[in-house]
Amino acid sequence: MNNSFSVEWLALRERFDLIARNQDIVQTVQRWQGRTSPLNVVDLGAGTGANFRILSPRLDGIQQWLLVDNDEQLLAEVGPSMEAWASRRGVDCEITGNQITVGRSRAQTMRADLVADLETLPRDGVHLLTASALMDLVSVAWFERLATRQYPALYFVLSYNGHIDWHPSDAFDEPARQLINRHQSSDKGFGPAMGPGASEYIAETLRHRGYEVETNAADWRMQPSDATMQRMLLDGWAEAMRALDPSDTLEEWVERREALIDQQQSRLRVGHTDLFAWLPRH
């Protein structure tokens, strides 16, 4: 499985991910955690560690994180990214090999293929399995493999849910959104992706397995000044859409959207869903 993202893209989106994180869900995670310390967390598709940087300050006590990714370049950036983040917060950061300590939280990086190595990942003693911007990329079959491992709690954030709203609007916005959603449901390395329906499917599946489940909106919201982020999204979407509809109508729409972005007249909302599921404690 090879479904990687660039360091530059992950760095650009981290601010938007932070703002989008649904705080009602965060509070539910905090209540669930209670006094569990140390809290053992596995983060799938961890990239450079953004999920750790966003969530760990919001949880109590000692935390032990395992940051899992298959991209050596991204894992190599975890240490520098953590050092820069800790410095901004005025917190000590110590790095020894693949072990990182920030305050009372510790993180260890691990390279693993999420398709081939899924069943070899730690299960015993893990309290929380989390992933950011991953679940809309995986297949039903892959998720069923994950669900059978019966982790005590699952926290999946920023799953794309199919909603894209541009302002000002354009007649081709809806056809473009449909093309994007078609592409989102194609194989991303895990089999046919769940795409925009991921959170609904996951919620229903986990409820049938005895989990309590909470979902809520976690949308990206971009202002005219966020031109770099809008342009990068548009470039990626345009490339994907051209594979499905290499038409002049599409190209004309892309040109109109580019002009509005460059003139700082464009606003964009991209719909995402945060989901937290937990097994009742007896």
Image (cartoon, grey):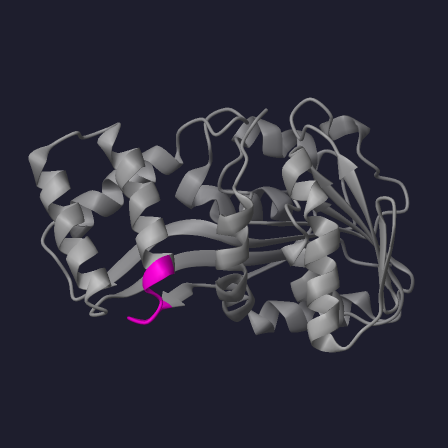
Q: Which residue is rendered at x = 41% and y = 51% of the image?
A: 161
On the picture, is 203 further left or further right than 27?
A: left
Q: Which residue is rendered at x = 31% and y = 54% of the image?
A: 231
Q: Can you say which quadrant of the picture contains the N terminus?
A: top right
Q: Is residue 224 magenta?
A: yes
The furthest residue to the bottom: 90
On the picture, is 71 further left or further right than 150?
A: left
Toward which corner of the image does residue 95 lie, by quadrant?
bottom right
Residue 86 position in % (x across, y down): 74, 68
Foreground residue among 104 and 139: 104
Q: How many marks?
A: 0
Q: Is residue 209 visible?
A: no
Q: Can you say which quadrant of the picture contains the C terminus?
A: bottom right
Residue 157 position in % (x across, y down): 57, 55
Foreground residue among 107 and 220: 107
Toward which corner of the image does residue 68 lie, by quadrant?
top right
Residue 158 position in % (x across, y down): 52, 55
Q: Is residue 207 magenta?
A: no
Q: Which residue is rendered at x = 77% and y = 27% of the image?
A: 119
On the picture, is 77 further left or further right than 98?
A: left
The residue segment tinted magenta is 222-228
Picture layout, residue 184 above or below residue 161: above
Picture layout, residue 92 above or below residue 214: below
Picture layout, residue 147 above or below residue 170: above
